[in-house]
């Protein structure tokens, strides 16, 4: 009897252990593992850069029983920078949570349709969520159908099984999805949750000062009616690097190795002054096209400014048009922003690239001050006036004029129309400088024009927005574009006198009129006196002549003055410097007794400037006397 009781007790223990082991075999614990897919390189200049998707692969747990509502959870992500995904209807975002990769081809069987929670066929309940009732098969929970297969059916109209859920902005760096049905997949199926359409302010981190690039990180939390443990909840979703470099090149694409190409003389009209602005990618995907309106396969790499998007997705009442979620407002745009352009100067830019590498191409889209032109939404247009192809030395450059404002600032914006994500390239645009010399009027004004080469549009909006363009960028450092310098000759007469019975006659000749085709120049001369008058009096004050035209001379004596408004300076003795606002000025002095009856001496004025001009275009012996 005792032996029988012991045997019965042993059987009970063995049966209990087998039951526990069998339960554990059938229903292993739910477990999700996070990964970041393909973390892209993003532009440090960017404020709304697309980061990589975060994917949860979940296995185990007990699937929801048939005819039972699937339990709901809250899913929330956090970045270490601001989330700048576009708001479709504040606070509802373009950020999406996808269940089981809807729209992605399957190894076998039909591709499940994409069904947006809140859209037609998947209405919201009073709590703003989309209840799902299980069929008993966890693989069908998010199959995108609008009709139910449960028996009896759930309360109408909640018979749908949506698979796309719209997030809402929870904080500057966070997106949340509330009340998302989560059905544990069990042992024969892997549940996939994909967080997509996340944009981030990469400029907050900037470029790392070490060999390791700055990293944008995403953290994910899932909480609610079902416990969802996550392995590796923190993931790197992007690496931050400079997006491009901006340089200036001469008109044929070389370096600025000929000073005449970036320096212009005030006294010479410029009809075809030319240089290039060059935008160079720092990595292969820095320049992107806008993409299409049906980039809707989850996990696909499109290498465009748009992310996951499908124009067929619906508008959800109170939450905005999900059909524009993920879509960029424009392709990569490149801006040349000109400032401090000297008065009298006109600028023209090429309507397309005049040089490129790496498969890049672009077209002018406007002269908007920040490069946005949101109404354009990616379609090229031309603004302003100006002829095409008027510069004979650059026959391939069709140009448009840059409109300059009262502060002498103007903008040119080009949009990328072609880019190769597997090459690092550059793209050049032509700039023409045009002005008519009017030295007597001080035109063009002297000074240095500055240009900033940046991505566009520029922004001061560094958080999520419903109206700011995507992508958008911060400004860059300026570079000197070209300089207008004075046409000038400085002459020195080392000794002149109108004392002790002597007088000095003086001449300034404007020799810019010649048989060599030199463009005639004109301008005044300012005469400076250094010495004293009779009896030790002060030297005369400087005086400025009238405009001395090409081929004429200013002639005067110290005692009597002369033409072009030169006044007499009687009793002066010393030296004279003349500063003439034209090139090719030459001077002469003739000293004699009054009346030139006894003696005389003449000499050429010394030219104080560096002798770099060659009007004949020839080389010959130079005796320099």
Image (cartoon, grey):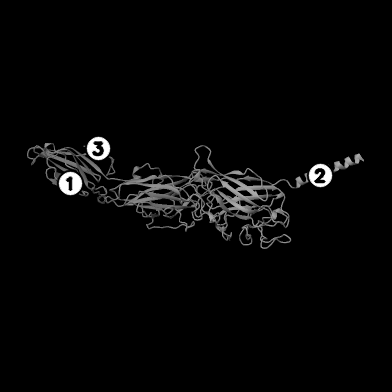
Residue position for label 3: 622
Using the image, determine if residue 538 lies above or below residue 166: above
Q: Quadrant of residue 502?
A: top left
Q: CA distance from mark 2 to mark 1?
A: 122 Å
Residue 534 quadrant: top left
Mark 2 lies on residue:
16
Separation of disc 3 and disc 2 at Cα? Answer: 116 Å
Q: Earlier in the sequence, mark 2 or mark 1?
A: 2
Give whichever of discs 3 and 2 has the lower sequence position.
2
C-alpha span from label 1 to label 3: 27 Å
Instruction: Judge by depth and name the residue closer to the eye, 457 or 253.
Output: 457
Sequence order check: which comes first, mark 1 or mark 3?
Answer: 1
**Is disc 2 placed on a helix, strand or loop?**
helix
Tell me if 338 is positioned left or right of 136 in this view. Answer: left
Q: Nearer the viewer, residue 59 or 387?
A: 59
Q: Quadrant of the N terminus?
A: top right
Label 1 sits on residue:
554
Q: Mark 1 against mark 3, which lies toward the viewer?
A: 1
Which SS class for mark 3?
Answer: loop
- Please tell me how crowded label 1 is: few (under 14), some (14-19), or many (20+) other residues with Cα within 10 Å: many
Quarter of the C terminus within the rendering? top left
Q: Are marks 2 and 1 in contact (CB under 8 Å)?
A: no
In x, y percent, where is residue 68? 71, 56
Q: Residue at x 53, y 38 (%)?
A: 212
Horizontal and vertical percent position of residue 77: 59, 48
């Amino acid at each position: 009897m005792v032996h029988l009781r012991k045997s019965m007790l042993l059987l009970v223990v063995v049966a209990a252990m087998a039951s526990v082991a069998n339960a554990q075999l059938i229903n292993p614990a739910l477990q999700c593992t996070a990964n970041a897919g393909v973390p892209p390189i993003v532009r440090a200049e960017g404020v709304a850069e697309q980061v990589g998707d975060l994917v949860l692969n979940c296995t185990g747990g007990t699937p929801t029983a048939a005819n039972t509502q699937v339990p709901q959870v809250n899913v929330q992500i956090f970045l270490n920078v601001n989330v700048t995904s576009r708001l479709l209807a504040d606070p509802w975002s373009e950020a999406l949570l996808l269940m089981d990769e809807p729209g992605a081809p399957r190894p076998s069987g039909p591709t499940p349709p994409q069904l947006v929670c809140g859209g037609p066929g998947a209405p919201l309940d009073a709590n703003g969520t989309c209840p799902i009732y299980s069929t008993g098969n966890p693989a069908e929970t998010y199959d995108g159908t609008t009709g139910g297969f449960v028996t009896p059916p759930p309360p109408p109209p909640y018979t749908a099984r949506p698979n796309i859920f719209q997030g809402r902005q929870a904080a500057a760096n966070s997106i949340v999805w509330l009340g998302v049905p989560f059905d544990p997949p069990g042992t024969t199926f892997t549940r996939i949750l994909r967080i997509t359409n996340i944009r981030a302010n990469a400029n907050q981190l900037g470029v790392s000062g070490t060999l390791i690039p700055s990293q944008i990180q995403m953290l994910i939390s899932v909480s609610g009616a079902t416990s969802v443990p996550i392995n590796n909840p923190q993931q790197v979703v992007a690496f931050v690097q400079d997006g491009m470099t901006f340089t200036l090149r001469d008109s044929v694409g070389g370096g600025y190795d000929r000073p005449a190409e970036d320096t212009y003389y005030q006294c010479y009209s410029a009809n075809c002054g030319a240089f290039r602005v060059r935008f160079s990618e720092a990595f292969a995907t820095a320049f992107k096209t806008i993409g299409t309106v049906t980039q809707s396969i989850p996990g696909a790499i499109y290498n465009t400014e748009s992310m996951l998007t499908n124009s067929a997705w619906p508008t959800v009442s109170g939450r905005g048009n999900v059909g524009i979620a993920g879509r960029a407002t424009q392709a990569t745009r490149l801006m040349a922003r000109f400032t401090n352009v000297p008065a009298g100067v006109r600028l023209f830019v090429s309507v397309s690239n005049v040089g490129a590498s790496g498969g890049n191409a672009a077209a002018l889209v406007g002269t908007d001050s920040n490069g946005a032109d949101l109404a354009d939404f990616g379609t090229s247009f031309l603004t302003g006036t100006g002829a095409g192809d008027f510069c004979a030395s650059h026959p391939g450059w069709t140009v448009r004029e840059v409109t300059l404002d009262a502060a002498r600032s103007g903008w040119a914006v080009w949009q990328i129309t072609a880019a190769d994500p597997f090459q690092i390239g550059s793209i050049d645009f032509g700039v023409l400088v045009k002005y008519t010399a009017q030295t007597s009027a001080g035109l063009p004004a002297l000074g240095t024009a500055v240009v900033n080469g940046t991505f566009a549009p520029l922004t001061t909006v560094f958080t999520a927005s419903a109206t700011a363009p995507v992508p958008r960028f911060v400004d860059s450092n300026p570079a000197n574009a070209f300089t207008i310098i004075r046409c000038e000759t400085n002459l020195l007469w080392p000794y002149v006198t109108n004392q002790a019975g002597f007088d000095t006659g003086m001449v300034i000749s404007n020799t810019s009129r010649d048989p060599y085709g030199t463009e005639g120049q004109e301008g005044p001369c300012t005469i400076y006196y250094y010495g004293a008058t009779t009896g030790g009096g002060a030297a005369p004050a400087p005086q400025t002549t009238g405009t001395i035209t090409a081929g004429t001379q200013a002639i005067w004596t110290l005692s009597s003055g002369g033409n072009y408004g030169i006044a007499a300076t009687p009793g002066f003795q010393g030296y004279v410097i003349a500063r003439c606002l034209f090139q090719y000025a030459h001077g002469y002095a003739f000293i004699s007794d009054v009346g030139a009856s006894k003696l005389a001496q003449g000499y050429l004025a010394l030219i104080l400037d560096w002798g770099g001009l060659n009007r004949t275009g020839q080389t010959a012996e130079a005796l320099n006397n």
